[in-house]
Amino acid sequence: MLLRMALIVALQGVTAPVLAADFADPTWPCIQRKVETLSAGLMWAAPIDTAAPQDTADLEKDVREIADLLALRRLSVDELRPTVETFAARYDGNPAVLGQVFEDVFTSLNARRSRIIGGIGDFSLSQIALSERIEAARMQMDAQMTADAPDYDKVDALEEQLDWDQVIFSDRQKSIQYLCETPVIIEKRLFAIAQMLQQMIN
């Protein structure tokens, strides 16, 4: 636990999101509250009709294509609005069809978000393990330097290992802010998509 606390303190000097990290959860170094999965019901006002009307043979394909577009984070929701408006008009703003689009997008992005949260946990644990390795190497160096007959070859090897591990630790920490922001970005995108689709319901 002391080593984990030391890791958190070390992270505080690298990036702001760690300042409010929950010490009780070593797999979550972010300032944002950890929410493993999202609820579609918090974003979509009405129950989603999973049996969308099959009034055209191409409906399922059309829903999948528009949902795949909306799931692409490199395209902003505003950029996609004209395409979605055209789609909604084709199906007369049918709430079942638009609800199915949202459900498909939600399933895709929520799964991606969960994988990212899992990756953040793996990242945090690997950093904790690396910090423990660094601390162990420092203790070995101290022991060697206070010994009656220090093994300077071993000290040199430990020093080289320390230098390398500290560089790796620092470089990895530079990515933590981006990692922590990504689940929030996905959540905001889902809310924006839900709002846009519901505005097009007749």
Image (cartoon, helix red, strand yellow):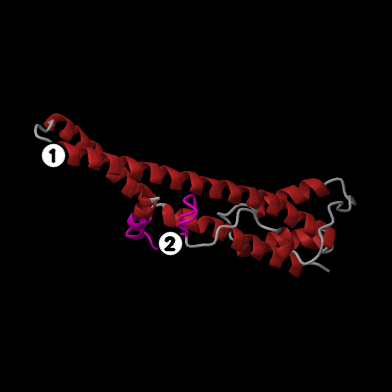
- Is residue 30 shown left or right of residue 77? left
Indicate which disc, 1 or 2, sits on the residue closer to the N terminus.
Answer: 2
- Is residue 130 shown left or right of residue 142? right
Q: Please give the residue where the numbered disc 1 appears in the rendered image.
A: 145
Quarter of the image where the C terminus is located: bottom right
Q: Does the magenta stretch include residue 28?
A: yes
**From what the image shows, is residue 11 above or below residue 132?**
below
Under circle 2, the secondary element is helix
Residue 100: x, y in percent?
78, 54
Residue 194: x, y in percent?
70, 63
The reply to whether residue 95 is visible in this rendering is yes
Q: How crowded is mark 2: few (under 14 residues within 10 Å), some or many (20 or more)?
A: some
Give the magenta part as a residue range: 8-30
Q: Please give the residue where the numbered disc 2 appears in the rendered image.
A: 17
Residue 31: x, y in percent?
47, 62
**From what the image shows, is residue 103 above or below residue 142?**
below
The mark found on residue 100 in the picture is: none
The quarter of the displayed image where residue 89 is located: bottom right
Amino acid under disc 1: Met
Under circle 1, the secondary element is helix
Amino acid under disc 2: Pro
Which residue is outermost to the front?
148
Q: Kindly identify the residue that appears in the image at 52 percent across and 56 percent down.
A: 182
- Is residue 50 shown left or right of residue 137? right
Q: How crowded is mark 1: few (under 14 residues within 10 Å), some or many (20 or more)?
A: some
Residue 142: x, y in percent?
18, 42
For this rendering, which residue is in front, 56 or 67? 67
Tags 1 and 2 touching, CB below 8 Å = no
